[in-house]
Image: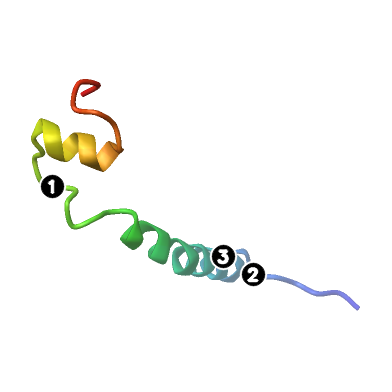
Amino acid sequence: MKIEIDDNVLIEAIVERVVERLKPLISNSHDTFSDELMDVKALADYLKVKKQWV
């Protein structure tokens, strides 16, 4: 028994599966605060360090 696989179909299936698995990771990797500026206190709180360290 010989099975032939169309490369384009296989590639498309792989791409769809990769995108499906990456979408949640990419969309969850950014907080709502990612575009905001922080002062020293906010950054220290975010990093859980003392203000002097910042």
Q: How is the image coloured?
A: rainbow
Q: Secondary structure at mark 1?
A: loop
Q: Which residue is mark 3?
A: 14
Select label 1 or label 3 by which is in front.
1
Crowding at mark 2 (Cα within 10 Å: few <14, some 14-19, many 20+): few
In three-dimensional space, the C-alpha distance between marks 1 and 3, rounded to whole angstroms, equals: 33 Å
Please name whichever residue, 19 or 14, is drawn nearer the observer in this view of the structure. 19
Residue 26, position as x, y percentages in the image: 36, 57
Select label 2 or label 1 by which is in front.
1
Q: Residue furthest bottom?
A: 1
Amino acid at circle 2: Asp
Residue 30, position as x, y percentages in the image: 27, 54
Q: Residue furthest right?
A: 1
* Discs 3, 2 touching: Cβ within 8 Å: no
In three-dimensional space, the C-alpha distance between marks 3 and 2, rounded to whole angstroms, equals: 13 Å
In the rendered image, the vertical position of residue 43 relative to residue 16, given as above or below? above
Query: Residue 48's image quarter?
Result: top left
Q: Which residue is mark 2?
A: 6
Please identify the quadrant where the C terminus is shown: top left
Q: Which residue is mark 1?
A: 35
In the rendered structure, the answer to whether residue 54 lies left or right of residue 22 reads left
Please identify the quadrant where the N terminus is shown: bottom right
